[in-house]
Image (spheres, rainbow, N blue to C red):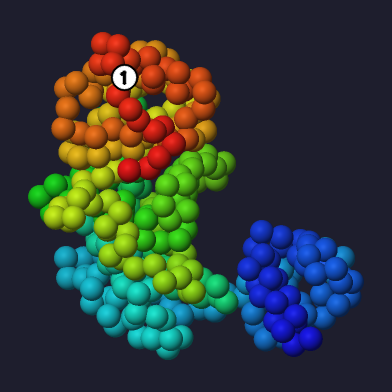
Amino acid sequence: MYKKSEEIRQFIIENVEAHRRNIASVAADKFHLTRQAINKQIRKLVEEKILSEEGSTRAKIYKLFQHILETKDYANSPDLSEDRVYAVDVLPKLKEIGVAKNLEQRCAYFFTEIFNNAIDHSEGSVISISVTYDERYITIAIKDNGVGIFRKIMKRFELEDERAAILELSKGKLTTDPAKHTGEGIFFSSRISDRFVILSHQLTFLSAGSEDVQIELKDDKLDGTLVSAKFLRSSDRTTKEVFDKYASGDSDYGFAVTHIPVRLAQIGEENLLSRSQAKRLLARLDRFKEVAFDFEGVAVIGQSFADQIFRVFQNEHPDIHLWYFNANEAVTQMISRALFAKTEGKQEARNPLSHP
């Protein structure tokens, strides 16, 4: 009986964020129990401050209880140092809750990279941090009151839309100050975390720690930039694993492989049909040795779009290995035509569903 109670508790903890209003019903169906039996477990979790509850009896909302480790504001100045802030104000708090070494290293990378970006790039006067934890995650958020990351990138690279800045960020090796930065910090911060979010003005950039990238347009406006990351406390993932994934070959430890969510090249409701759109997608990709194009969420592409990538660009850069995956039948057909034209009837063998 004790074992089943623990299974129920763990199920509730792992699923409450996705079922805030009906977690009791979901758990009751899962374990073939009454809602009263599940509610007994939920009440215990609330008493233990593992869950929090809001609302009336009939419309309660349950969430994982958020414990605050640190919140603090810093005046941005040349004397502000990200590694000092982390060592003094963040690391001791993480040690208090017994964070594993691999997780601490991932938190350290995220914090120092994003805090340093706020110092050097935000043009803001104040940088704020928040470090919280619940039963499953550690969450770190860094906010500034500056010009906004997407707007700054848009102006610096003369892009037509702030959403185009997210496409450039997703590629990696993007910086508005190449003398001081490699442009790798945000790319790897999004991969090292388990859930990564940037909010600026009316745009939200979401990444589930790897390739699952989304853009959301909000009605409300956030001045400056807020970057937050969630880290699963039970994860055994290391920074080395993340960096190795984007290195090319056993002897090359540089950032040589990138993953491009092709749908980010779409501005608004447009379809990806033209060479100009392909060129927008291909900008700066000559800096990599391998490029993987993810066509998830792309319904159709034009022949010119496919030809520009898989024939013209590939012929201009024969040393760059191009891959594609998650392509539907219509997209695959267009890509196949471009590959056929490239090899003059001798199409190269490629697996469109395999990641390099």
Taking the spot 41% from the left edge, 61% from the top edge, the residue there is 193
Q: Quadrant of the C terminus?
A: top left
* Residue 318, position as x, y percentages in the image: 17, 27
Q: Is residue 261 above or below residue 344?
A: below
- Give amino acid for label 1: Gln
In the visual, does 352 lie left or right of 63? left
Q: Secondary structure at mark 1?
A: loop
Q: Is residue 159 visible?
A: no
Q: Which residue is mark 1?
A: 347
Nearer to us in this view, 287 or 163: 287
Indicate the quadrant where residue 157 lies.
Answer: top left
CA neighbours of label 1 inside 10 A, class few (<14), some (14 to 19), many (20+): some
Q: Quadrant of the N terminus?
A: bottom right
Taking the spot 17% from the left edge, 27% from the top edge, the residue there is 317
Q: Residue furthest left?
A: 179
Indicate the quadrant where residue 236 lies.
Answer: bottom left
Taking the spot 17% from the left edge, 70% from the top edge, the residue there is 79
In the visual, does 206 lie left or right of 275? right
In the visual, does 220 lie left or right of 163? right
* Residue 24, position as x, y percentages in the image: 80, 68
Count of labels in the image:
1
* Residue 316, position as x, y percentages in the image: 16, 22
Q: Is residue 231 visible?
A: yes
Q: Is residue 58 above or below residue 289?
A: below
* Residue 60, position as x, y percentages in the image: 79, 67
Taking the spot 65% from the left edge, 72% from the top edge, the residue there is 13
